Amino acid sequence: MNLSGNSGSVAGDFNDTGGPMPSEHPGIHALSDVIFYVTVTLGIPGNILSTIAWLRWHVARRNSSAIYLAALAINDVIYLLRLIFRRHGPAGSHHQQQQPGFGWLWRGLGESARILEPLLVLAFTVERLFAILRPLQVSCGCV
């Protein structure tokens, strides 16, 4: 969005990650970079460790929510990898022109992860609702 009052083109109002452009101030741009790198640095290893923890046999067997939480963690890793690829990938370079399917693959995975996230949260919430309302029947109706 162009908040300065000047009329700008829509194409120039968004950055390479799809969000609104940071202000022209270098401090705002640097803060945006710091937040991005902290999110990626903590998000990818944390979600991988969460996936490993939730998919352990003795945890998944006793906890009906473990599969949903593991799916959310895997989904987040895919989305974060897509963000890295969009920010630092070979966008418009010679490599992407030679292999256009690779760019479409990452875009498709990222969009799938973005769309799947609220659906997984909804499924997790409904499963928890069943666990509260009918605690003895949860093992029959879930995954």
Image (spheres, rainbow, N blue to C red):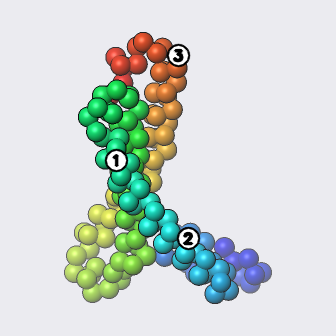
Lateral position of residue 131 relative to residue 53, left or right: right
Which callout, 3 or 1, points at the residue further toward the start of the chain?
1
The Cα–Cα distance between marks 3 and 1, rounded to whole angstroms, is: 27 Å
59 lies left or right of 114: left
Give above or below for 41 relative to 55: below
Q: Amino acid at mark 2?
A: Ile
As helix, strand or loop, the secondary structure at mark 1 comes to: helix
Mark 2 to mark 3: distance in Å?
40 Å
Residue 96 visible within the image: yes
Give x and y (percent) for residue 91. 36, 80
Residue reaching furthest to the right: 5
Q: CA distance from mark 1 to mark 2?
A: 23 Å
Q: Residue at x 60, y 72 (%)?
A: 20
Q: Which mark is residue 20?
A: none
In this view, the residue in front, 105 or 52, is: 52
Residue 133 has which mark? 3
Does residue 117 appear left or right of residue 90 in this picture?
right
Mark 1 residue type:
Thr
Q: Quadrant of residue 33?
A: bottom right
- Mark 2 / mark 3, whichever is N-terminal: 2
Label 2 neighbour load within 10 Å: few <14, some 14-19, many 20+? few
Q: Secondary structure at mark 2?
A: helix
Residue flagged by tag 3: what amino acid is it?
A: Leu
